[in-house]
Each structure stands twice: as structure tokens, then as C-alpha cells.
Image (cartoon, helix red, strand yellow):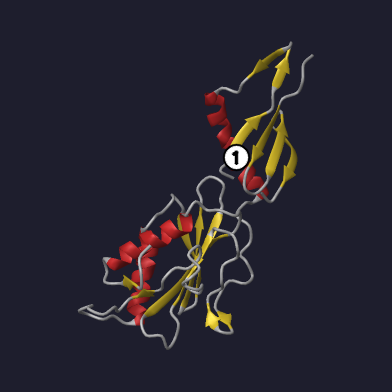
Amino acid sequence: MASTSATTYRCSYGSITSTRGKVKNFRGPSVGFTAIRQNEVEDGSRHQIPRRELILRSSELAVLGAIFQFSGKKPEYLGVQKNPPSLALCPATKNCISTSESISDLAHYAPPWNYNPEGRKKPISKEAAREELLEVIKSTRTEKSKPRIAEDKGDYLRVEYESPILGLVDDVEFWFPPGKGSVVEYRSASRFGNFDFDANRKRIKALRLALEKKGWASADSF
């Protein structure tokens, strides 16, 4: 007896079930995407989905990503907090790092940067440091994500990094706190999921290494 085949895509954000190319069910939010074709039974025989077809079907994920808008909305709590003045803390999920966290929180803490560290021969102004930071942001690509300057408010910058296939967005904030010399605080976090496979930490490290070539330094290294 023939049965209708269905493909279920499961991810860290949810699951999508399609039958004959039509989306029948979407459950989210809960993507290391794994495409699983349910047992296809026809005339009493079972067939496994070929690897080539599995790869080709990955294009469907991009379409589904566009349909369901995996980019999400900017979290309302982003920006400089008022009491005390700082960037937001991280949620309990393992897809965020922030200089506002306690140094004892190894999963979320990241050390701030200093654009005029001890030993720099030619100190620069905050305005010059902002230009260096913007230059590095635009020229440094990590995880093939394209950066977009979403907010530029003088002492505060917010950059959106969007993944090329599904359009998943990470929000990366930079803040030049007044009264703290040449220190730069930052926060990098994914909008969805519970894990980021260290994508945010790797991105910050890549930016730091590029800035170090310009004379910046970190209070510590990853």
C-alpha cells in the first residue's frame, strides 16, 4: 500500500513538516538543520533519501527561512542600560557574551577593549577609535555573515550580522562609556536558539585580533 512521503526539518528553533513540497506544519521556536525523510513505503519496499537529493533539498531551508523570517525582531532590551550604565547582561542560553557579565561567568564574560593601552606610542582620540572600529567591522567577515550598521549614536554602535542562508541575525553592540578613559565595552548575542557553536566568541576574537594590529589591546584573551 502506497503512503505519502513527508519531510520534517528539525532545528534548534522548531520543526517544519512538508508534504509534496507544501508546508503542512511548523512548530517553533526549537537549526544544525537535519533533514529527515520519514520512511517512504511504496509497493512494500523502503527507500532511503539519496545524499545528492538531501543536499539539493537544503535549498528548501533557505526558502523556509525567508517565509518564516528567522531573522526575528531586535530585542527591546538592547542598548545602554540606565542603572547602572552598562550593556545588557546575557540570558542563560549559551549564545551570548558580554563585558557586563561577572568575570567569574566563564560562559558569558568577555573582557573589554582599550584603544589606548599602556605602551601605545601614539594615543588616539575616541573619534579616531570609532573610525578604526567601524573600519574593522566592515572589513572583517566571520562565519560568512554580512555586517550591517543598524544603529550609530556616537558612543553606541549596534551591528547586525546576518547568516547567508537562513538570515539568522546576531546583534553586536559596542559602547564607549564616558568617564572610563579609552575603554570599549561590547555585547554579542544571537536572537534565537540556545547554542551558537561559539560563533559570537569567534567573531569578537576576530575583531579583537584585527584591532590589535591597529594598537588596541584587551584586558585578557580568549
- To which quarter of the image does residue 48 belong? top right
- Give above or below for 31 relative to 5: below
Q: Is residue 147 left or right of residue 123?
A: right
195, 172: nearer the viewer: 195
Image check: 14 left or right of 185? Answer: right
Residue at 55% from the left image edge and 58% from the top image edge: 94
Residue farthest to the bottom, as pictured? 179
Q: Point out residue 97 in the picture as x, y percentages from the top left corner.
A: 50, 65
The residue under the point 29% across, 78% down is 117
Q: Is residue 173 visible?
A: no
- Considering every residue shown, the one lying at the far top of the view is 43
Q: Is 68 situated above or below 75? A: above
Residue 21's image quarter? top right
Q: Residue furthest left?
A: 121
Q: Pick the quarter of the image with the N terminus.
A: top right
As drawn, is 122 to the left or to the right of 160? left
Q: Residue furthest front?
A: 104
Q: Determine crowd level at label 1: few under 14, some 14-19, many 20+ residues with C-alpha closer than 10 A.
A: some
Foreground: 118 or 104? 104
* Pointer 1 residue: 61
| Position of 174 relative to 35 (above/below) | below
User: Residue 185: x, y in percent?
Assistant: 44, 75
Residue for point 72% across, 14% down? 42
Asked if residue 116 shows in the view, the reply is yes
Q: How many marks?
A: 1
Residue placed at 32% from the left, 76% from the top? 115
Query: What quarter of the picture does the C terminus occupy?
Result: bottom left
Amino acid at circle 1: Leu
What is the secondary structure assignment of the residue under circle 1?
helix
Image location of residue 159, percent across then percent down? 49, 65
Residue 40 screen position, x and y as percent = 70, 21
